[in-house]
Amino acid sequence: MSVELVEVSKVVGSETHIRSVSMKLEPGSLNILLGPTLSGKTSLMRLMAGLDEPTSGRVLANGQDVTAVPVRKRNVAMVYQQFINYPTLSVFENIASPLRVAGRPKAEIESKVKQAAELLKITAMLDRTPLELSGGQQQRTALARALVKGAELVLLDEPLANLDYKLREELREELPRVFSESGTVLVYATTEPTEALLLGGNTATLHEGTVTQFGPTLDVYRRPHDLLTAQVFSDPPMNLMQVRLEGGRLQLTDGQEMPVAGLLQGLPDGRYTLGMRPNHLALERPTESAVEVTAEVTVTEITGSESFVHVDFAGERWVVLAHGVRDLSAGDRVPVYIDPERLFIFDAEQRLKAAPGLQAAA
Amino acid sequence: MKGRWLIPTIYIILLMIPIYWLVNMSFKTNQEILSVLSPIPLNPTLDNYLVIFTDASWYSGYINSTIYVVMNMIISVSVALPAAYAFSRYRFLGDKHLFFWLLTNRMAPPAVFALPFFQLYSSVGLFDTHIAVALAHCLFNVPLAVWILEGFMSGVPKEIDETAYIDGYSFPKFFVKIFMPQIASGIGVAAFFCFMFSWVELLLARTLTSVNAKPIAATMTRTVSASGLDWGVLAAAGVLTIIPGALVIYFVRNYIAKGFALGRV
């Protein structure tokens, strides 16, 4: 099934939850909705599922207008971030529920539930009730229920957010494989850019109810159309610097000048915002052409093999990803190197002008 | 700490004295009750109970009370279920005011309604019927049941409803098969509170009945005969009135506290 949203908006009271979103989800595709909390991921999913009706705009399924079709008439499945199961039914009955309602024969229900339970490794729990299970098993039950339905549109709303990281890694790998039935459109909401990158597929970045960009995940990551998309699709947040290009001279916030080299070449005069991913900044000179600025350390987070060094550069908060354990304390002044080949350059309207591997058109 | 049990024990003993005395009296003869002060019956007798179980004017009181109490429980809970669901799940104009207004119904004393009910029921021919009392008690029990059930329902995540719709359940099927089992304890507690009110309420029940639907509480107030009060039988009737309440409490004992908090725990 293909799902298409045409200029869909959702207004609740005086608040706009979704602002004129248009996107087309292809049959058999994995689509990721990426955005911080309250950016409208859940609202958008509810509109796709038919749980809510859009204030304006249309929802098409296989080209047919289904905007006003209630959810129980649509062939969709949804899994929530909270573990939602029917607490009074056994795990088996929980998984079987959509099949029972559809009035399928007993033998078919039996075999489908067994198969789904096997796939999600909850076969041993089928006789228990959901509340006797661990969080991970409860979520597997919910996933199994979505799976047996064989829905054409499967919506997973941050399904792994409430699980511990071991389970998340395990399930994250399994999920796309488990749902990769022919033609199923899978929509997966997450707040984490890393998760989007690990899952691949297509990504739509959301910001305050608008889809800022929708396309293949790596494309969106490498070539964010605008600053908002780049900020949404970056964790830790993208480091920003306001600069001014005038007569072949580039002035930084702290008054320092930077040679117009690398990606900066070929840009017309004006104000720009430079965006640098934390791994694009360095504490040691990476290349000859790198520009050195001095910044003050505020916090150092050590993960083990890497350290996130938070620094303050002329009022801007930056994060530098450095290899190894860095024992820096707050107030230390350190050199930070900016590679002119590894920049995202946005113009005054916040549109992308140049990115690593994408030179500005002269 | 030693002696921690002392104060609660004294408290419970004080609480139990009237009940003990009632039970004690019910096994005595009238003559003994009026003549000596004995902590245990000198000549234990079951005659008082025998009177109640054999005399139709006595046992029909229990039957009448039970009929209208059960009717009231069923009506109150089945009316309150959809109402509570609406208050718990939907936002509509004035919903909060309406919800509060419901509870204010309970703030008026039943006596206020005795006369209008009597007049109304007499004119539509409902006087001295079980349904008359059951309906009159609904005025007080439906709001309470709505409040209790709303609390229990709001404890069930809205996503469960949606998951059921996504699975394909129709609303009635979802409500009966998925939703009601989840608030079963709430339904039990709501029914219990309806029972409690309806079972002990005397004024409306007595005003709205004369013979055919006369409740036990009214029967008990009319035992004065030429020879004075029949103390022993009255005590036995009192004991039998306590038993159903005790039984019902036993079944919902684990949820009572939540019920007193109107389901909001």
Image (spheres, grey):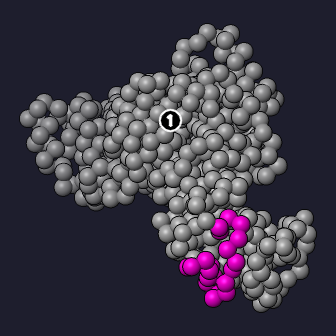
The residue sitting at 14% across, 37% down in the picture is: B121
Q: Which residues are magenta?
A: A246-265
Which quarter of the rendered picture does the C terminus of chain A lie within? Answer: bottom right
Residue drawn where x is 76% and y is 70% of the image: A339
Could you tell whether B127 is left or right of A118 in the image? left
Residue pointed to by mark 1: A24
Q: Residue furthest left?
A: B123
Q: Nearest the camera: A38 or A233?
A: A233
Q: Position of residue A52 (x, y in %)?
A: 41, 40
Relative to B53, A313 lies left or right: right
Work out whether B129 lies above or below B203.
Answer: above
Q: Position of residue B37 (x, y in %)?
A: 52, 60
Q: Chain of mark 1?
A: A
* Type of amino acid under label 1: Lys
Confirm whether the magenta stretch covers residue A358.
no
Q: Residue at x 52, y 47 (%)?
A: A42
Image quadrant where one finds the N terminus of chain A: top right
Please name whichever residue, A83 or A296, is drawn nearer the observer in this view of the structure: A296
